[in-house]
Amino acid sequence: MKPALSPPISLVSVAILSSFVFDVALGQGPPPPPPLQSLNPPPVPAGNPITEAKAKLGKALFWDEQLSATRTISCGSCHQPESGGSDPRSLLGDPASTHPGADGIFGTADDVTGSPGVILNREDGTYDQDDFFGMTRQVTGRYTPSAINAGYASSLFWDGRATSTFRDPVTNAVILNAGAALESQAAGPPVSSVEMAHQGRDWGQIEARVAGSKPLAVAASLPTALETWIAGRNYPALFEEVFGDSTVTAARIIMAIATYERTLFSNQAPIDAFIAGNTNALTAQEQQGLDIFRGIGRCAACHGGSRFTDDDFHYIGVRPVAEDLGRFAVTGANADRGRMKTPSLRNVGLRGEFMHNGRFATLTDVVNFYDRGGDFNAPNRDPAIGPIGLTPAQRNALVAFLTNALTDPRVASEVAPFDRSALFEGSGRQAFINGSGTPGSTGLEPRIVATEPPLSGNPSFTIGLDNALGGAESILVIDDAPIGDGSVIPAAGEVKYRIPVTLAGNGAGNGFGSVSLPIPGEASLVGRTWHARWYVLDAGAAAGVAASATATFSVFGASAGVLAAPANLSASDGDSVEEVALSWEAASGAVSYEIFRGPDSNFANALRLGNSAVPSYADTTADPGETWSYFVVAVSATESSSASVSDTGFVAVTLSPVTGLSASDGTFGDKVRLSWTAVDGATVYRVYRGETDAFGDSTDLGTVLETTYDDTTAQPGILYRYWVVAEGSGGEASSPAGPEPGHASLTRPTGLTASVDLTTGIRLSWSAVSGASEYLVMRSGSAGSIGITVEPNFEDTSAPVGQSLDYWIVA
C-alpha cells in the first residue's frame, strides 16, 4: 500500500513561503497602499457654493468658444469627455498638435504633443506670424491634463502653479482663501495668447465679450437641459439669475466655470462597483492588473487613493530635466527640477496620449516605460522609478486594468453630467478651402487662412494670407458668387468686398497679412454662401499676379442683438460733384461703422465701401448722376448690428458747357432758331434769353430734349442775346453757353389800301406788323421815303395832282 499524500501540508507550505517572500519584498519597499475607497463629490469652497443654476452657467461658459479672442476655442475644446477630459485633437506626430519643444526645432526627440490653440492674433483681430507656427494655430508646450475629477486637488497644472487661493484677476484681491485651485486654474487660459487670447488681452475685455455675446452662439447644438435653462436669454440675464444682478465680472465667470467643473467627478467606473463589493465588476485579467498596480508594479506609490493620484510632484525620467523644469518654475527649489504633478488615472483609457509632453500614444507604451525603469536619470528622480521586470502577461493585465476598470461609461458616452455642446470646430460650419491658386515667386502658392466662425453679427471675422511675397500689394476679394480662376483681379464694383493690404515680411514665401471684417447681423445674409480669394501682385507669377485657393463659407446663427442699427441715415442728393455725403446718428456702444452701397433698397445686393470711426462718411467713388442706396452697420467690440434703413443719394454730374451755339439773324420772321452740339451726360437743355449781355438779367424760356430750339416769342426786329445750359438727370447743370445774338425779321406789311380825299390828299392804310415800331412810306417818283409813321396808316398830302402813283410800306 502506497503511503498517503499530504496535499494540505504542501499547499500550506507554499502559502507560507509566498507570504514570506511578499513580506520580505514589502520590507524592502514602500508600505502597502491603503484600501481603495469610493470616490465622493469634491469639496466646495465656502465662498463659491454649488447651485444648479451656477453649474449650468458655468457649463455654458466652459463650452462657449466665444470666450476666445478668435471665437474658435473654448475651455472644453481641450477638455472633452470622449478623451477622458483631455484633448482628442492632440495626436502624437500630427503637425497640428506638435510643439517643437525646448530646442525650438520640429522633428526632434524633445517635441511635445500639445493642444492646438489660437493663431497668434492682435487686439484688432488681425493675425501675426509666430516664430514656430507661422499663421497656423499655436500649440501648447504641454499635454492637456484632464478637467474631470480636477476639483479635488489643492493645486492644478502640471507644475501646480494654480493654487488653492483664488485672487480676482482684475483687482488681485483674495476672493477664496482655500480650496479654490479650480478657480485659480480657470483664470489662466482665457488670457493666454497661445490658448485663447489675443496679444495683451485682459479680463476686462473678456468681461465685455461675455456680456455682449449670445450664449453658445457658435455651437452646433446644445444639451437639451442646458438649452431649456438658457431659454434664449443673453449672458447678463443668466448672471442675474445666478448672482442676483446682471453684472458680468471676471470673478463670476471663473467661479461659475469652477462650479461646473466640480460637478464633473466620475465615480461610476467598474472599479467603483468592485470597491462596493461587486467582485464581477472586473474581469480576472483586470483584477490581476489591479493586484500588479497595487503590488509589484509600484503604480500605487504615486497613483494611490480613490482618484489614483497623490496630487504630488515627481520627476520620473520621461525626458531630461532641463527640457522642462516643471515644478521648479513655481518653487525655485532644485529638488523640484523636472517634477510634474501626478495625474489622476480615472478614465485614462480614453486619453490618446500620455505624460506631460504627450510622448506616448498607448497605455502599453506607458507600462513598458515604467517596466524598464524610465528613460532618463537625475539626482531627484523618484525612487519608485526603476526596472520592474513584468512578464508580457503581467503587462497586458496592467494595461487591461488601466484601460477598462477606471473608465466611467458616462464619460465615454458623454452623457450627463458629462454631456456637452457640439463645438463649432468640427461642425461643418468652418470655411473649406477648395480649388487651387496661382503660384508666385519661386513657385510658392499663397495660402489663405480661414478658421473663424462666419457668425451673423461677428464683429471680427478674420481671413489671413501667408506664403506670399513679402512687402507686396495684395487684394482680398469676397463675393457671394464664385470667384474666377485667379488670373484676373476682379475690379472694384464687381464684387461685394475688395480690400487692399500691403503684406508684411520680406522675400518670396515670407509675406503675410490679414483682414478682420465685421459680418453684419442681418437676417437676409444667414444661409448665404460666400467665396474669398487673395490676389498678390508678384512679378514672379504668371501675368504678374499670384493667387490663393478659394475659401468658401456660409453665414449662420445670430449674435446677441444688443447693438442697434444706426438711425436716421441721410445721403446727399447731388449737393456735390465730388461725393455723396453720408451722416447718421451715433449708435450706443459702437466703435466703428461699416458702409455699404447698392442698386436698390435690398441690403443683400449691396457692396462694402469702407468703414468709419465717426457717424459720417464720404463716398467719392459713386458715378456722377447715378442714384445709389446706402446702408450703415454699427460695430462694437462684441457684435455687428443689422443694416440701417437705406437712403438714396447721388453725385452731381459735371457737365461740359454747350458748344456750337448759334441763333438765326432775321432768317425767320416769326421766330429765332437756336442750335448747338450735344453734351455728354446731358438729359435736357435749358434756354435763356435777354436783351443785354448780362446772363443774370436773362429770362428762362424752358427746356428741350433736343439740340435745337425755336423761340417763337421773339419780337421781330429786336436783337436778343441767348444762352443754353446743359442739365443732367440729377439736376446737375453746366455753366451757361452764350451770349449768342439773334433776332426775328419783320414781316412785310399786308392789306395796303389807298383812297383819294379831294380835301387832304391820298389816305393809306395797312395791317399792323407785329414788332414794328414805325413804318416808312415810299411813293413812286420819289427818291426816298415820303414819311414815317408809328401807326398803320398815313395821309400823303404832297401827292401830285392828276398822276397815277404807286405806294410801298416798309415796316
Image: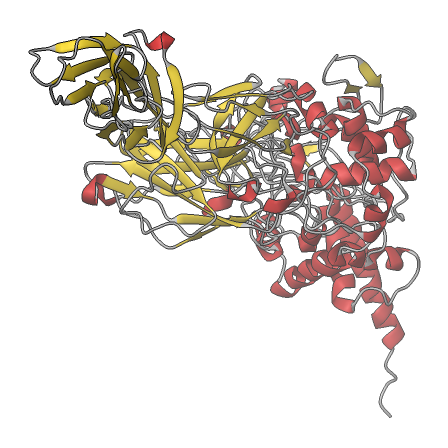
Residue 461's spot in the image, x, y percent? 54, 36
Q: Which is more toward the observer, 3 or 461?
A: 461
- The answer to whether one can see residue 102 in this image is no
The quarter of the picture where the C terminus appears is top left
- The answer to whether one can see residue 408 in this image is yes
Residue 455's spot in the image, x, y percent? 61, 42
Q: Is residue 376 above or below residue 811?
A: below
Task: Tell me the residue at 63%/33% (across/down).
Answer: 645
Residue 437 placement, left or right of 341:
left
The quarter of the picture where the N terminus appears is bottom right
Residue 643's spot in the image, x, y percent? 61, 34
Residue 755 placement, left or right of 76:
left
Task: Tell me the residue at 81%/64% (across/down).
Answer: 282
Residue 13 placement, left or right of 89:
right
Residue 342's spot in the image, x, y percent? 70, 38
Q: Which is more toward the observer, 331 or 626?
A: 626
Q: Which is more toward the observer, 79 or 463?
A: 463
